[in-house]
Image (cartoon, rainbow, N blue to C red):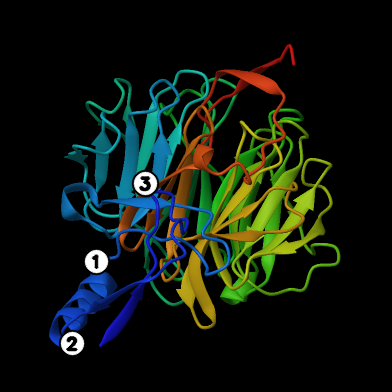
Amino acid sequence: MIICNLRQNKYGKRRNATPTIRVVPIVVLFCLTVILIIFPTVSHGDETGSRFFWESIGGPNGDTDLRDIVIDPRDDNIWYVGSQNNGLYVTRDGGNSWTSFLGGTIGSIVIDPYYYDIYASSGSDLYRSTDLGLSWDLVVPFPNTIPGPSGDSPTFINSVLVSYSPGWIAVGLSSTLHSARIYLTNDHGGTWWVSWESPIGYHIWDMLEDPYWGSWTFCTEDANHNANPVVMRSIDMGTTWQEIPALTGVPTSGHGLNLDINFWTGTIYFLRECSLLSVSNDSGVTWSPSGAHFVGFGSTMLLDSGCPNRIFGGEMVRGLSDGGVFVSEDWGQTFSFLGLPNNTVSSLAIDSSSTILIAVSDYGLWTMDLTIDDNISCDGFWTILSDGFESGDTYRWSISED
């Protein structure tokens, strides 16, 4: 069998136009193919681009069944990674070594923007660490079942909101039968009450606070788990909620998955399962389509606070969707493929300098150095003083001399 080998440099770009002809035994080629399928290491993107380079660092302690990742705003080398079945992993050296904590399914990881405590949910229990993840204390065990017309339904926490107002925390408790509750505290977790409870049919996917106007929102779907996204909004710290029923001009398909805010403009972005992106410029009162989407089924979204024009998105492998990571460099108007085909990407994180992108997929953790490609644009013109937003962390900015 004849193979045409085009050599590549470390950035995945072809640097030698003269092919080298080699004869490779069929058995050896077959084995190498199997290895590459089972243990993918690097994705160079599509045939025309070759503009990106992903490095696999595997899974913490061999666990590749992961859900979420958060980088600590005080140290880019400290990551908190949630597993589907094996609890929480913490690294203090950028992924070289790991320590495991808790157990079960980690549904949400957030950092308190005021105290910098770290919160992680495992099943229906909420935990807190006050020492950079070295130890974890149980804050409250929420009910592990919710009664319904079809019987008791097991519960889980999929979203937690830690407010910019000290002491206020909201927890979205969902169930396998898709009923849900919002639990609220204003004393740092000492006492809790139910501020909202759904009729049968709601599942709470994500929660967000607008630091400019103080409003809270969470995304869900309508009754009976139909693929119709619904946004609930509160202007009194989650005490009462108003349904924002229809997203203006948006087809009613795809569950609501993620909410994120552009701190530069105040625009809130809403990602749905079918990769459609909606935006609100009035703190969630009205919504309109952004005009952009990925290719198939969206799974996660990350706004780059260091580069306000950049939005990253992850897709799942499902149907005609091939998975992978996408990037918008024009404030969400258009998206292009950034690599990791055949990977279901469940979470994304970026370091404080907006140079290292980390993706969580069903093959483990991947990192990408965004500085190696001058074509990935950044319109940032402010300098970052302290950072770390990932579902609730804090950024402070100052205008650059440039």
Q: CA distance from mark 3 to mark 2?
A: 58 Å
Please name the residue that numbered disc 2 is placed on.
26
Label 1 sits on residue: 39
Horizontal arrangement in the rendering, residue 87 relative to residue 191 (left or right): left
Please, which residue is most extreme toward the top here? 401
Q: Where is residue 331 shown, x and y percent of the image?
A: 74, 46
Earlier in the chain: of badge 3 and badge 2, it is 2
Looking at the rendered structure, which numbered label has been put on residue 324?
A: none
**Screen quadrant of the C terminus:** top right
Question: What is the secondary structure assignment of the residue under circle 2?
Answer: helix
Which quadrant of the structure image shows residue 374?
Answer: top right
Of the residues shown, which amino acid type is indicated by label 3?
Phe
**Location of residue 228 with respect to 107 vertically, above or below:** below
Q: Residue furthest front?
A: 18
Number of marks in the image? 3
For disc 3, the marked residue is 142
The three-letter code of the residue at mark 2 reads Ile
The answer to whether marks 3 and 1 mark residues whose Cβ atoms lie closer than 8 Å is: no
Query: Could you tell me which secondary element the residue under label 3 belongs to?
Result: loop
Above or below residue 49? Residue 286 is above
Residue 179 visible in the shown view: no
Query: Is tag 3's residue or tag 1's residue first in the polypeptide sequence?
Result: 1
Task: Answer whether labels 1 and 2 touch (C-beta < 8 Å).
Answer: no
* Residue 387 to residue 347: above or below: above
> Residue at left 49%, top 53%?
52
Q: Examine the rendering and report whether any part of residue 298 can be seen.
A: yes
Callout 1: SS:
loop
Q: Which is nearer the eye, 145 or 311? A: 311
The residue mark sitting in front, 3 or 1, is 1
First-in-chain label (1 vs 2):
2
Amino acid at dot 1: Phe
Name the residue rendered at 35%, 58% in the picture. 42
